[in-house]
Image (spheres, rainbow, N blue to C red):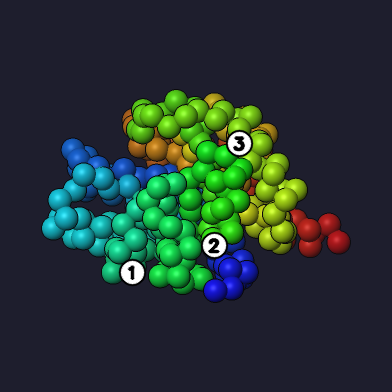
Amino acid sequence: MNIDMVHRNQENRKVTRGIYPIINFTPPTDPEKVLDWALKLPETGIKIVQVRAKRYPTDALMGLLDEVVSNLRGAGLTVILNDYIELVGPTGADGLHLGLDDYPVVEARAILGMDSIIGVTCRSFSDALQAIGQGATYVAAGSIYESNTKTGPPIIGTSGLAEIVGHIDSEVPIREGWGRKNNVPVCAIGGITNEYLKDVHRAGASLVAVIGAIQDADDPVSEALQMVNSWTELGAYADPLTSTAQQT
């Protein structure tokens, strides 16, 4: 398997930066109420979302994800499933996000092919290096802060995020035009709100995964727009390839 082919999908390169909402459909969440605002996310400039749907009975899960993914993709969003590798193909999702112990990345890549986006949660550079070597499109470093959605993971803070970014920047072969550093995009995850964006930007994040700050807001679409605007003001949406071309 030629993992270098993972780097050649330019559409994936373009969407793996910016604010990255994780849309939680876990019961007792009402899927229709979530979809009501989630389908408006493209209006904010968001291009990629992750769908999280834990604790559903097996017989109900396929129907739920089939509806959710088709609607979100119909709105123009790139959709990543949290776990459920067996449902990526049937639902038409664009890729998969894995935890460290969920499923071997190399096997997921072999099953899903080179054009699927595969993200992997990592706690250290050694985790990230292993995931990248097995074909991860991006790695997610965290938890950066305390999170109400998922308790238990160690807090690595922005210093841990910066360490992972720094190691990738200096030790992983260049992936031209990807992320903010012409390399594998690093996604900051865990407890991130608008007020923390400057800190995770300074630490080198290319993507920022957000759950509660958007979904639990009184107006999720407005909160998403505010976060997109904040990230844009930091210059973090700039395309490395476009920026380089403009300078020459």
User: From the image, which quarter does the N terminus lie in?
Assistant: bottom right
Residue under the image location 69 percent in, 54 percent down = 172
Q: Is residue 85 visible?
A: yes
Vertical side of 115 occupied by 215: above or below? above
Circles 2 and 1, Cβ within 8 Å, touching? The answer is: no
Task: Report the front residue among 145 and 127.
Answer: 127
Secondary structure at numbered mark 3: helix
Q: Secondary structure at mark 2?
A: loop
Which residue is rendered at x = 68% and y = 60% of the image? 175
Q: Residue at x 43, y 57 (%)?
A: 104
The label number, if any, that marks residue 135 in the structure image: 2
Q: Quadrant of residue 224?
A: top left
> Which numbered marker is on residue 161?
3
Q: Residues within 10 Å of mark 1 (few under 14, many from 20)?
A: few
Q: Position of residue 9 (x, y in %)?
A: 57, 69
Which residue reaches farthest right? 248
Percent across and percent down for residue 4 are: 62, 69
User: What amino acid is labelled 3 in the image?
Assistant: Leu
The answer to whether mark 3 and mark 2 are in CB contact below 8 A is no
Residue 138 placement, left or right of 73: right
In the structure shown, which secondary structural element does the residue marked by tag 1 occupy? helix
Give the image location of residue 88, x and y in percent.
34, 64
Tell me the residue that label 1 is attached to: 89
Give whichever of discs 3 and 1 has the lower sequence position.
1
Quadrant location of the C terminus in the rendered image = bottom right
- Image height of 124 relative to 218, above or below: below
Depth check, mark 3 against mark 2: the one in front is 2
Query: In this view of the protein, which residue sits in the foreground, 209 or 127?
Result: 127
